[in-house]
């Protein structure tokens, strides 16, 4: 079986993104776990959280949040960092959605995946954006899709912040 150039490019890009995600996690959370320094790891958490909310790097940000929440970091500080870095990264996702062509995104994340996210936003509007941010779902892809369909920035931002607040406050109270 012979692979086409496009398939080889996808494999190389996917591999590079996986290596990037592993490197970021290893140099931040991994280092803090190894040295037992989660109590001073607010910067490490900020890097992981910001990276995890970029649509092309899938990282378990909720697990990192719970890990650092168990330390002695101020609860308000970790929540502020979580929401702030998530909003920052999802703003980048939205801007990428505005700036790139549909064809490029279709090739990157798949036409079916993009069309499904787009259909959800068009059908349910802001509720979709809120729900994807309130639950541990792929909210960065929703932000990307919102940018691509030119969903209003204000509505997207309000629903993103509201959903993130619900998610992180609930996680704080549970854990």
Image: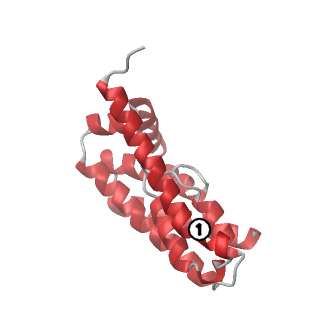
Circle 1 residue: 29
Image location of residue 83, percent across then percent down: 51, 71
Report which quarter residue 41 is drawn in. Answer: bottom right
Q: In this view, does 87 lie above or below 128?
A: below
- Compared to residue 34, the image places residue 145 above or below, namely above
Q: Nearer the viewer, residue 153 or 164?
A: 164
Residue 135 at x, y percent in the picture: 61, 55
Quick one: 68 or 23, which is closer to the camera?
23
**Residue 71 in the figure: left or right of residue 155:** right
Residue in the picture at 32% in, 39% down: 105
Tell me the quarter of the image containing the N terminus: top left
Q: Looking at the image, which residue sits at the far top?
A: 1
Q: Determine whether 69 is above or below 103 in the image.
A: below
- In this view of the protein, can residue 32 be seen by the observer? yes
In the figure, residue 167 lies in which quadrant? bottom right
Horizontal placement of 113 versus 5: left or right?
A: right
Q: Position of residue 15 (x, y in %)?
A: 44, 42
Toward the front, the furthest residue is 35
Color theme of the render: secondary structure
Q: Which residue is drawn at 54% across and 52% down?
A: 132
């Amino acid at each position: 079986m012979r692979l086409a150039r496009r398939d080889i490019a996808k494999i190389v890009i996917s591999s590079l993104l996986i290596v990037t995600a592993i490197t970021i996690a290893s140099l931040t959370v991994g280092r803090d776990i190894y040295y037992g320094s989660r109590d001073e790891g607010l910067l490490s958490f900020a890097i992981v959280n910001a990276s995890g909310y970029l649509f092309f790097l899938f990282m378990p940000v909720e697990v990192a949040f719970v890990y650092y929440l168990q330390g002695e970091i101020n609860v308000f500080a970790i929540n502020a960092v979580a929401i702030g870095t998530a909003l920052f990264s999802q703003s980048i996702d939205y801007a990428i959605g505005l700036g790139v062509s549909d064809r490029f995104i279709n090739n990157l994340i798949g036409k079916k995946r993009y069309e499904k996210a787009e259909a959800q936003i068009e059908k349910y509007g802001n509720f979709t954006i809120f729900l994807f941010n309130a639950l541990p779902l792929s909210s960065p892809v929703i932000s990307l899709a919102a940018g691509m369909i030119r969903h209003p920035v204000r509505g997207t931002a309000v629903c993103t912040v509201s959903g993130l607040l619900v998610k992180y406050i609930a996680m704080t109270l549970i854990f």
